[in-house]
Image (tube, rainbow, N blue to C red):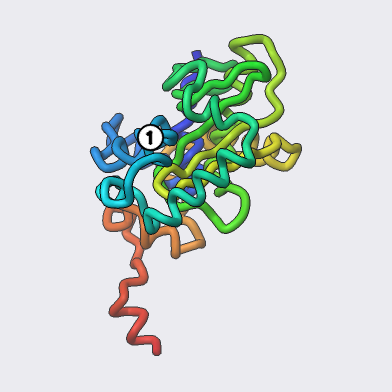
Amino acid sequence: MSDVTFGDLRSAAYCPRQCYYDWVEGDREPPPRIERITSLAFRYEELLAADRLSLAAEPIEVDPAIYQRRLADAKARHERWGDCCQPTRRRALVDGRECRGIVDKVFEGPLEPAVVAAGSPPERGVWESHSIVAVAAAKGLAWECEAPVETAYVEYPAHGVIRRIDLTTRRKAAYRRTLRTVREIDGPPPRTDDRSKCDHCEYAPKCGVRTRTLRSLLRRR
C-alpha cells in the first residue's frame, strides 16, 4: 500500500511546506463546516427544489437564486447529473499503485471519479490542487478496477458549480511532479515564494512568514 495520500498531494500542490506541517500535526478531522459543505454535493436535487429561505440557511456561498440557477444549468449541461446526485459509490477508499485516498463519488459506465472541494472555484476550469487530486483518484480507480479512466469531475458544492475535466498530458505531468515532491520531503521544505498563499495558511505563525495583513497593506498605500 502506498504511503502517499490524496491529502498529501492536495497540500503539497498548494505548498510543500504545508504538507510537511500536516504530517507533523498528524491526522485531523475536518471542521464541521467543511463536512456540512461537502454534504451538499449529495443533495443537489433537494437543494434545487428547496425554497429560498431554507436554502439561505445552508452553507452556500452565493445568493440562493444564483445557486439554484447554477444547479439548473449543471443539470441541463452534464450528462452525468444523475450520477452526481446518486453516485455508484460514495466516499470510496481507493488504494492505487502510487497513492491512496477517499474518492468522494465514483461513477460507472464509463468509470469516472468526482472530487468534492469545499472552497470557491476559479472563473474557469479547476484549481491545480484539485486537478492533481482528480488525476490521483482516476489513476487509483484505474488501477483498482483495471479499466481506463480519462475524465473526472470536480465539484464546488458551496457555489453550485460542477466541472468536468479531461485528464490531459499536462494534468498528468503536474500530478507526477507533485507526487515526486511529496516523496522527496524529508524535513521542512523551503518556504514558498508566493507569499499570498501564506495569508490563508493556518501554519503561517509556525512557519515564521509575515503575512500580508490588512494593516500592512494599508501602510503601503
214 with respect to 148 (left or right)? left
x then y, percent, for residue 88: 51, 16
Q: Residue furthest bottom?
A: 221
Label 1 element class:
helix
Say which of 9 and 154 sits in front.
154
x then y, percent, for residue 90: 44, 20
Q: Which residue shows up at 44% across the image and 59% down it?
A: 197
Q: Which residue is mark 1?
A: 46
Neighbourhood count class around disc 1 (C-alpha, 10 Å): few under 14, some 14–19, many 20 upward = few
Say which of 191 and 134 sits in front.
134
State the image quarter where residue 178 is shown: top right
Instruction: Indicate whether 182 appears above or below 129.
Output: above
x then y, percent, for residue 160: 46, 46
* Kind of residue at disc 1: Glu
From the image, which quarter does the C terminus lie in?
bottom left
Q: Which residue shows up at 43% across the image and 34% down it?
A: 45
Q: Which residue shows up at 49% across the image and 25% down it?
A: 105
Q: Which residue shows up at 54% across the image and 25% down it?
A: 83
129 with respect to 52 (left or right)? right
